[in-house]
Amino acid sequence: MDYKEIIDKLLSDRLEVDFEVIHDHFRTKVYKLNYPTPLVVRISKDNIKKVAFDKALLDQIDDSSLTSKILYFEERVIKDENFLIQIQLFVSGYPLRNYPDISLCKQITRATYNLQNKLKRVSKNFEELMIPNIDQILSMITNDINDQRLIIEAKRLMENSRFKELSKANESYLTHFDLWPENILIDGDSVRFIDLDPIIYGHKLFQPAVLFSSYFLLGSYLFNEVEKFDIDQLIEIWPVDLVKYDLLLLMLVFPLGIAINKERQFKSDEQFNKDDYNESIKPLLYSIDYIWNEISKTSQANEKFTY
């Protein structure tokens, strides 16, 4: 299949197959092309080095039961602007629109555990690419915060002695940092992941921490079903033992990092609206409060600190 020709025909409205726009937001447009083997074409302002990394990572993961490879990508000028265009196989499935029952929770946690193991196996292959770790990410994004609540929360976490140890662990692995509900697709007994970005290095507890805080905790708020979130149940069904206190500390990174990033996005908008900003970070502040409350009820069992 000539992927360059497919792009030419899509952009000039000469495709011989049906297609549909499945995403059109923030200067990113995603098409599904209904060939016998469906394809996805993504047109965005992504950096070519980032997409080259994504392709290399997906090639090494090499598991169609979990995600999809990038088949082709190129830079192209469209209406005097540079865009990055990439083609992937279509990943079937749909994001959930309500909080998963226990059976689905087990499916999602097992699939995430499998993805984590795939990422762990290839982590050393990408060490020379200067992919940031948790500590570096927080240091970078907390340099320019104006929201006093976020300043307090960032300082509280980064000054926690146990968090310092976890964030600077000698052994760290590639971690999918964006496991919110839209990026996990359910198709019968299959669970697949899309948009493996951003990827950062983190402690081996960091992947379940991201899943629990972004997909389950934040998801329960977005689905208006907060009463269904049960951290102890999730810890119980994760395939290997987890230390709750350490897990909770690492769970704070996702909502705090996303809230800080939202503040930066809103500040850069000339039509900044404080009410819109406050509403956008409300679910994230809820998550932060919930996690700190759980931490306050969880003992620091020192004998469990060695991994």
Image (cartoon, grey):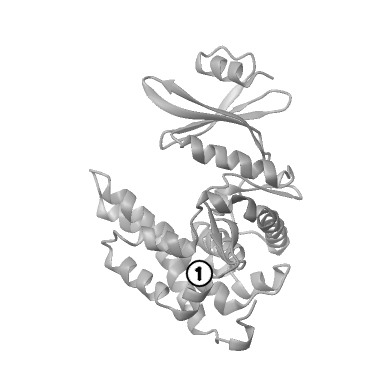
Q: What residue type is labelled 1?
A: Ser
73 left or right, relative to 111: left
Where residue 138 sits in the image (x, y, percent)? 41, 63
User: Among all residues in the image, which is located at the extreme right?
Assistant: 189
Local packing at callout 1 (Cα closer than 10 Å; few below 14, some 14-19, many 20+) is many
At 31% across and 68% down in the image, what residue appears? Answer: 151
Q: Is residue 138 left or right of residue 97?
A: left
Dividing the picture into quadrants, the one containing residue 31 is top right
Left or right: residue 178 compared with residue 158: right
In which image quadrant can residue 113 be found? bottom right
Rendered view: 80 above or below 147:
above
At numbered mark 1, what does the secondary structure look like: helix, strand or loop?
helix
Q: Residue at x 63, y 13 (%)?
A: 16
| Above or below, comparing residue 232 to residue 71 in the picture | below
Q: State the image quarter where residue 143 is shown.
A: bottom left
Tell me residue 211's x, y (percent).
59, 61
* 21 relative to 18, above or below: below
**Is residue 93 something that shows in the picture?**
no
Which residue matches tag 1? 167
The quarter of the picture where the N terminus appears is top right
Which residue is pictured at 37% across the width and 58% down the height? Answer: 141
Residue, far left: 270
